[in-house]
Amino acid sequence: MASLTRNVFLFLGRTNVSGLGIKEITNRVTYATALFANSTSGNKGLPDRGGRGSVGRRPRREPGEPRTEKMPLDQDWTSVYPSATSFKSNAVPLPVRMGYPVKRGVPPEKKGNLELLKIPNFLHLTPAAIKKHCEALKPFCTEWPSALDTDAKCDEHFPIKVESTDYVCAGPSVRNPSARIVHLKVKLSRFNLDDHARKKMLKLVGERYCKDSDILSITTDSCPLRQQNYEYAKYLLTVLYHESWKIEAWEAEKTAADMEEYSWEDSLSQKNMLDTLLRMKVAGEGEDAEVRKQLLEREDVQDYKDSVVRLKNEGASESSMLQYKEAVRKVFNV
Amino acid sequence: ACHSEKHVGQFYTLPSAHVRHLFPNGLPWRFQHQTKTFNETCIMVRQPALEVISCLKKADYSQPALRYLFYGLKGSGKTLSLCHTVHFCYTQGWLVLHVPDAHLWVKNCKELLPSSYSSSRFDQPLQATTWLRNFKITNEPFLSKIKTKERYVWTKREATEAGSPLGELVDQGISRVKSSSDVVGAVMKELRLQSSQPGADFRMAVAVDGVNALWGRSTIKRQDKTAVDPEELTLVYNLRKLMKNDWSGGAIITTLSQTGSLYTPKSAYLPQELLGERGFDSVDPFIPVSVPNYSEKEFESCYLYYMDRNWLQHPQSRTEEGKKELIFLSNRNPSMLERLCGFL
């Protein structure tokens, strides 16, 4: 039988303690349907049976006062919880309550609370503990270069940032497969891209680019080793840059649906507007192309163009609708 | 009908003779019940309608037709603003081409026939005949005045000669149900051509409710269960031709409607969302007019109107407290207010 040193509080409140000469406390939990685990030596001649109920009357040893009472206020917490352990209710001096409250009651207290045991706790990672960790790690670190004291300088000299995680594990094997993942982050503004190259790069890269912060992040995890992933990420970056500068023959077939932004020239809207104005015979009679160009130069037509472009690019909203309305009214003099 | 800014918030009564002629079934359903209950048709004068009416007064009718679009949240009064404007046009003696709800043409179609005029399109005889009947009731005086310019051949034995009055064309459509959609197309074409001419003595108002149905999707299916594009429906095709502003001598007044529209989210109310790309490009350039919920003054006026008609029976609704509750519950949305007051 495994003798376990554990404080388990019994719901039925009966503790059988055997082995008086031994420091261990062997507790038997008596439930109605559970089998007994018979104790070892020290039985005072109790008959072996899987009996329920009538266990021998052993003097019940009272649990002592919880350790929290004896804790001074300025104790060293890092020694109470030096590593990640489960929640010990008599070692944590906080009056914590957790769980679903009974009717017209409060959440149950921490003594004997299984909910507190189940959840992960970070009692071993208080600021004091972290300070101690840092102090312990300091001999292994090198100094930060004094010239790089602001973020801007770091970005300027080292635009590419590579991130990878190391894992320490005390188990059958020290290797962790997640250690092979490599993240490569770089700002696109550092690259020398013209208009076409930038659009092509954005299309190639897709989700990996964040517009607000202008950062391209490439995450590689397809190779088994970290060094292989790092080389692959660098290769990807190089290939993206060079490919976006090349212009293929089939790129000439780009349709209006592929365009990222709405351009008013050669659009239906422009055609409609011009046709309407021509029908209104606003400009004098003349050559068709010239008349069109003249019409386009007009200020209210320019306003109209701005409002339509804004509507299409930004989507509809009250203010853009109002702007459009004003522009149309000006064109038609209403 | 000579309303101005000073009259904002006040109700005006439409004479019942006008209502019978102008809106055989053009008014919203709930409003029709309200008219029957109160025994009179009262519309509130509101800013959006006034804006469009003033534009109509100022506009020059030798220019291509201007397009106006009422848009707003659900129940904020777009259809009634349209009706107000249409009534104004009617009192000015214009010819009114009113389509009460374009969504009815793209869904729940009981009979779909292949078109006699063009093999790729489909006809809807039932909706076409209903519309022709309403058109006849609305525009009685014009039917004898306008003459057709071309000759239309319906079947081997029937044809309408050029120069015959429009009324004959309409009657033809009502009696010969099979070709009614084509008659609708012919009527629209005639009117479009004629009002553009400088010598025309009438002006045309095209009023379409739920115009986003023309460019949306439809639930009508062919025999082999493939969906029909709205373009392939004769009625929709002809109406789209009217919506283009290549004719002059009139105005096009439309509203958007999310209520009947298909496959659009409930919260969409801005023109671009409901019209879609194609619709927007076709209606562009247009003047969008926003129809907001009631303002303070308009709410007061509506509340007083209901009180005056003894519509609010509950004792608490007549107090200040009750009024505040009504404001809170309905958020000054006209249709919500109307539904709430119906319970009181």
Image: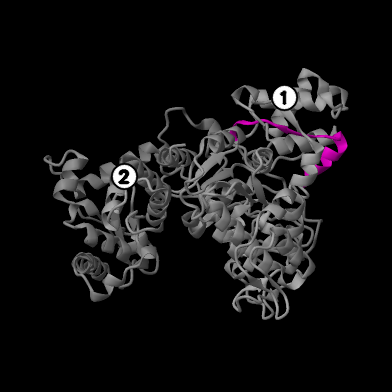
Q: Mark 2 vs mark 1: same chain?
A: no
**Residue A287, position in %: x, y?**
27, 56
The C terminus of chain B sits in image quarter:
top right
Q: CA distance from mark 2 to mark 1?
A: 74 Å
> Magenta segment, which residues?
B27-48
Name the disc covering residue B160, or none.
Answer: none
B41 vs A270: above or below: above
Q: Which residue is mark 2?
A: A133
Q: The disc numbered 2 marks a residue on which chain?
A: A
Residue B44 magenta: yes
- The percent position of residue A86, horizontal first and vertical second, equals 52, 49
Q: Give, as a three-letter code, the residue at label 1.
A: Ser
Which residue is the site of mark 1?
A: B301
Amino acid type, label 2:
His
- In the rendered image, the residue lying farthest to the left is A147
Packing grade of label 2 (10 A; few <14, some 14-19, many >=20) is few
The location of residue A296, given as percent across then percent down, is 30, 48
Judged by depth in the image, the label closer to the viewer, 2 or 1, is 1
Q: Is residue A295 left or right of residue B51?
A: left
Local packing at callout 1 (Cα closer than 10 Å; few below 14, some 14-19, many 20+) is some
Question: In the figure, is residue B273 to the left or right of A313?
Answer: right
Left or right of A259, for residue B169:
right
